[in-house]
């Protein structure tokens, strides 16, 4: 008997990482005016941001259907296997509800965990679940451990532009224009499963200081556990600058420019934050 782990592409786990970790990655869908795409299957992160910048209207994303979850579970499960499905926050997507409906078809062999998070913060729960699975823990033990980490996994990110929040109707045009003219960058987090504004900053030095301040306010980074830097768009130069400015905060022996510590935002979250976002996901001390 083995434990199968499934997760949606809102985690920004790459197909290569999923294969290495023995995790089933289910694509969410993104719809541009001309076509539907499967995140990380029929469209890459680079292609997505190229289309996003060129598009006059904001694309839409859709959850994974109960049918798609059920079919993925049928393929993943052997006769004596169990499965754990991790999902993007139920307060931002219907994936959790879809997964629960699908799980009901497997007589208790499938359990669903709502990470109450997105992007690389969701990915951290995947890494933790994989570690526990590989240590021989049961599904119930894994869920109990992940539940204990719900308040410890943090995501702090700075957005480069307010334009995509405006296009999505999250802020009005006047606010977006004022932010653009003043060079104001919003700093956000995921709190209790929803997007929350932590503060605003202007200028690269102030932005870096604000991110550090907010990381420290949350308890600081537990470097004994996984962490990830994250960026959106085709150009990661802003993230590289942020990392370079943060080297003194990192433990010796850690190379933050190593690809294993860096994740690119894909279609699901990229639709709402646009290019040029940078951030970090971590376990708080």
Image (spheres, helix red, strand yellow):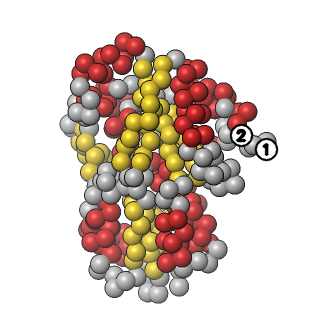
Q: In terms of secondary structure, where does tag 1 sit?
A: loop
Q: Which mark is residue 283?
A: none
Above or below — where is 52 with respect to 255? above
The answer to whether residue 21 is visible is no
User: As rendered, which of 266 and 177 lies closer to the eye?
Assistant: 177
- Residue 84 at what x, y percent from top left? 45, 72
Q: Which of marks 2 and 1 is in front?
A: 2
Q: Quadrant of residue 167?
A: top left
Above or below — where is 233 with respect to 83? above
> Image check: 254 left or right of 91?
right
Above or below — where is 107 with respect to 160? below
Q: Residue 253 carries which label?
A: 1
The span from disc 2 to disc 1 (Cα, nearest Å) is: 9 Å
User: As rendered, which of 190 and 76 lies closer to the eye?
Assistant: 190
Residue occupying the point 51% across, 28% down: 235
- Residue 127 at what x, y percent from top left? 56, 60
- The residue that label 2 is drawn on is 250
- Residue 79 at what x, y percent from top left? 44, 87
User: As rendered, which of 23 and 279 lies closer to the eye?
Assistant: 279
Residue occupying the point 52% across, 48% down: 154
Q: Quadrant of residue 236?
A: top right
Q: In terms of secondary structure, where does tag 2 sit?
A: loop
| Within-10-Å neighbours for mark 1: few <14, some 14–19, many 20+ | few
> Image check: 233 left or right of 103?
right
Residue occupying the point 50% across, 77% down: 139
Query: Residue most toward the left?
Result: 33
- Residue 73 at what x, y percent from top left? 38, 73
Residue occupying the point 39% across, 70% down: 112
The answer to whether residue 136 is visible is yes
| Within-10-Å neighbours for mark 2: few <14, some 14–19, many 20+ | few
């Amino acid at each position: 008997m083995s434990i199968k782990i499934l997760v949606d592409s809102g985690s920004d786990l790459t197909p290569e990482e999923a294969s290495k970790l023995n995790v089933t990655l289910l694509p969410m869908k993104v719809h541009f005016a001309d076509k539907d795409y499967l995140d990380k299957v029929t469209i890459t992160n680079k292609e997505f941001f190229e289309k996003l910048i060129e598009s006059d209207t904001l694309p839409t994303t859709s959850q994974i259907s109960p049918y798609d979850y059920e079919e993925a579970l049928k393929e993943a499960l052997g006769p004596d296997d169990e499965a754990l499905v991790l999902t993007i926050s139920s307060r931002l997507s219907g994936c959790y509800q879809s997964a629960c409906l699908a799980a009901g078809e497997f007589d208790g062999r499938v359990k669903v965990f709502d990470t109450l998070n997105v992007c690389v913060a969701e990915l951290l729960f995947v890494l933790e679940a994989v570690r526990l699975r590989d240590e021989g823990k049961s599904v119930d033990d894994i869920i109990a451990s992940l539940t204990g980490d719900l308040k410890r996994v943090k995501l702090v990110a700075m957005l480069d532009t307010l334009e995509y929040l405006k296009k999505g109707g999250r802020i009005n045009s006047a606010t977006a224009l004022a932010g653009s003219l003043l060079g104001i960058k919003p700093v956000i987090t995921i709190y209790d499963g929803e997007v929350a504004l932590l503060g605003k900053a202007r200028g690269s030095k102030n932005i870096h200081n604000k991110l550090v301040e907010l990381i420290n306010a949350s308890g600081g980074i537990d470097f004994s556990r996984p962490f990830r830097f994250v960026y959106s768009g085709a150009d990661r130069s802003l993230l590289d600058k942020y990392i370079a400015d943060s080297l003194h905060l990192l433990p010796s022996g850690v190379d933050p420019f190593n690809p294993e510590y860096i994740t690119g935002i894909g279609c699901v979250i990229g639709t709402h934050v646009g290019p040029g976002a940078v951030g970090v996901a971590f376990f708080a001390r």
